[in-house]
Amino acid sequence: MPVAPNCPPGLELDGQDGQGVGGVGGFAGGGGKGSLHYPPNLPCVADLPGDICPALVICLSEQRAGGGGGGGFREGGNTGLVGGFVFQPSCAAAVPNLPPASAFGTGGPMNPVDPSLDPNGGNLKGGSGGGGSGAHPKDAKGVPIFPIGCDGNVVPANTVVYQSGAGGGGGGGAGQVQAGRLFTFVGNAMIDGGGGNGGSSLGSTGQPGIGQVSGGGGGAGGALLVQSGGALTMPGGTLLDVRGGIGGTNQTGAAGGNGGSGYVRIETDPAPAPGAFTGNVQPMMPTSALTTGLFDPANNPPEADSSAGASKSFFVASPTALLVSAQSYELKIRFLGGAEFTYSDDPAIGPLPTPGIDAVQIFFQGQAGDASNNPIPGTETPWVTRVGPTMDPTIPSLNDFSVRFVRFVIVFDRALVQSLGLDAVLEVKFNLLTE
């Protein structure tokens, strides 16, 4: 809808459509439709009052916009809503408090892909985004008349309230996880490809500017492809989630539509038995997001990245010292034929591994701990290649940081592993300074 002539150029009053599936297109690609601002003539200050019409008794506008539409993917998104308790009608029947259904954010249409999620065929895509919601003047104050009532639709400039729209939720991402042989999830592992929730505002009603924003639409769920060249083990607590995001809400009943769900594809060799993994996938109702099949590397070859890695979770390097004080590390490897070699950041023990020459690299990261010996989130250090003291202040070391916990990741160069005949990593050892 056009805005009043005295509004700044480029002012956006309507909710924007969500991006389509895979980030392509808008509503036609599955994105939720943004809702329109309400009332139609929602003016800038110089053009007051426009269609703003406070209720005649409480002398506050109860006019509100509809919610944004949810994004669509495997399922269509839901259309936004508007409702809730209306204390008094507006001062003019031509501009009631609630907009027509045509102003609501329409849910994004289904935009399906082949459920095999074959990435080579362009089927592994993220979900669409939810639509935003339009602006409205809920709680704009009119001019009261003693002892009760309101002076028509007069709205002073210093009491006008414009509730900005809420953003729609982002679509869930697309992810592929692949193992050449056995694949085991441990504990309550989760791969979250669900859509983002629409923007909400849950403050108290009756406070101008607080709690009245119409909800944005939820994003559609994404796509998850899990492949194993052997058996795949998922404990009961493992969850692959591609549910659509929940539409945003407020306390006036103007809610965004929920996003539609995405896809989960699980392939193993041999193919999963009928009914396998149904307890590990959401959603399963009203229709299942899960399909299964045989993992065939000939038609869907494993990723051929130039490197692979193995990592260790954070651990306490010293059971007694509050802070890590390391002298050096030792990384011991074995080649085919039995020969062993040791890398280190202490030249007296061994050389540092050289990228492009040696088959392995190792990186370290630290984290601070609290008084109860628990890790403190957000205190992770940069990844470094040394743990002991260095003579060059431009080369970072783990000793430059106050950390209690340590972890490491070993990166293997696939080509050099084969050409040099690397057989195994035997040991990663920390040599601590005096505690």
Image: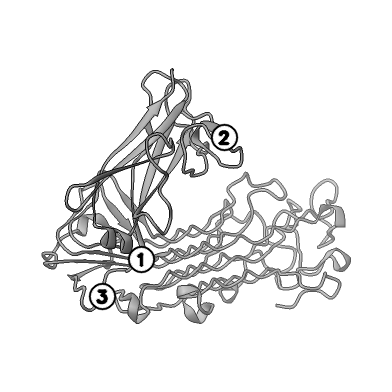
Q: Tell me, yes or no, if residue 324 can be seen here.
A: no
Q: Secondary structure at mark 1?
A: loop
Return the residue at label 3. 300
**Circle nearer the N terminus (2, 1):** 1
The answer to whether 186 is drawn above or below residue 298 in the figure is above
Residue 391 marker: 2
The answer to whether 115 is drawn above or below residue 427 in the figure is below
Q: Residue at x 38, y 24 (%)?
A: 318
Residue 33, percent across and down?
55, 73
Q: CA distance from mark 2 to mark 1?
A: 35 Å
Q: How many residues crowd mark 1 within 10 Å: few (<14), some (14–19), many (20+)?
A: few
Residue 138, percent across and down?
69, 57
Q: Secondary structure at mark 2?
A: loop
Q: Secondary structure at mark 3?
A: loop
Q: Tell me, yes or no, if residue 134 can be seen here.
A: yes
Q: Residue at x 31, y 74 (%)?
A: 117
The answer to whether 185 is drawn above or below residue 319 in the figure is below
Q: CA distance from mark 3 to mark 2?
A: 50 Å
Return the residue at label 1. 305
